[in-house]
Amino acid sequence: MLWEAVRLAFTAITRNKLRSFLTVLGVVIGVAAVIAMVTVGAGSSAQVKASVERLGTNVLVLRPGRVRMGPPSGEPTPRFTLKDVAALAELPIVATVAPQANGTYPLVAGNANSTAQVSGTTAAYLTVQNWPLAMGRAFEPGEEAAGAALCLLGQTVRDKLFGSADPLGETLRVRGLSCQVIGVLSPRGAGSFGQDLDDIVLIPVKTMHRRLQGNSDVGSISVALLKSVDSATGIRSVQALMRERRGIDIGQADNFSVTDMKDFNTLLSGINSVMTGLLSAVAAVSLLVGGIGIMNIMLVSVTERTREIGIRLAVGASGGQVLTQFLIEAIVLSVLGGALGIGLGLALAWGGSVYLAVPFTPSALVIVLAFGFSALVGVIFGFFPARRAARLDPIEALRHQ
């Protein structure tokens, strides 16, 4: 009996193919949007977590200036110097310190050219960032002290300028500086905000100061704490040292910031979760709209098939059988829309993951919940038209033209 009701439901649905397609379209869009949003959001959160984990567990980042609410004060912010880096390295709780002086410069190698971020730093940067070399070697202390014209390439820069050729020993021109390539960094992919981490060139920080920037400013300092030191203790020690070095009196606010990368991970993950939840809630509304569309079409179908319903009731069909038939039609429409929505949602999620360079992490639970919700929509919004059909008076139905 149930199979016969399903067969009749498919017959009624295929009788008006275009109308049936437009009916399920709302469910398709709703399910696809929910799956795509949640999957891309989960991939983004996973990427943020992986990016921070690559830095290690006890890494602090110092930057000049502090986070302010409202318009900027206009007060000049003192920059860091290499003397600050040396002082931080003397702290007993610190394992490694790496300065960074960043800038964006044109690059030329042979007939190829590009533009990338150039970061003046030391070999300690590779340790703090947990960033191994794919080939070649890092800077040596004597080369860093002398400001040697050497460089390490990110994979993206290597691909743009040298392709598959071995770049070691080749010359790279960074604006007016000609430097020798001594190493290539292992690929890292996209960062927390989708930026290409491999589109970078590392040179000794003193080379950056003397040959490119013309000053001794350090834009940021990465501090790796000893594993036995907790982040809170490290932050207090670093803040105390920097306040003393920068002449900040008691009661005055810091003119620098100290960021714990674990807190940064928690913040970004929280933002991702909230945004994913909001977007998924908006997407779920389209499922309700699709359900209303199913109810509307089923009501129209009941009106169109009033005489058919009257004949069925007159020849002995019960109201429950009529209710079941129309309810199954609504459920078939919603389930069909849910199945198509799953395929479309996974395709959109995969495309979004590729475009945003985040991991593709589909969740079976989300897919099952989205599909189950689409079926529930069919039951809820299909029940009222089905009940109306089951309650028709056979005599009045047979009179209907």
Image (cartoon, rainbow, N blue to C red):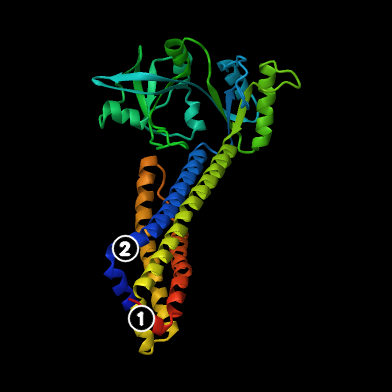
In the picture shown, does residue 33 fall above or below 161?
below
Q: Quadrant of the C terminus?
A: bottom left
Residue 5 visible at all: no
- Viewer-side residue, 30 vs 59: 30
Tags 1 and 2 touching, CB below 8 Å: no
In the picture shown, does residue 299 fall above or below 1?
above
Tell me the quarter of the picture where residue 156 sits: top left
Residue that protrudes farthest toward the left in the picture: 111
Q: Residues within 10 Å of mark 1 (few under 14, many from 20)?
A: few
Question: What amino acid is labelled 2 in the image?
Answer: Arg
As drawn, is 282 to the left or to the right of 153?
Answer: right
Instruction: Say whether disc 1 or disc 2 marks the residue closer to the N-terminus.
Output: 2
Residue at point 53%, 15% (across, down): 217
In the rendered image, which residue does mark 2 sit on? 19
Residue at point 40%, 33% (across, down): 196
In the rendered image, which residue does mark 1 sit on? 399
- Viewer-side residue, 254 vs 323: 323
Residue 221 visible at all: yes
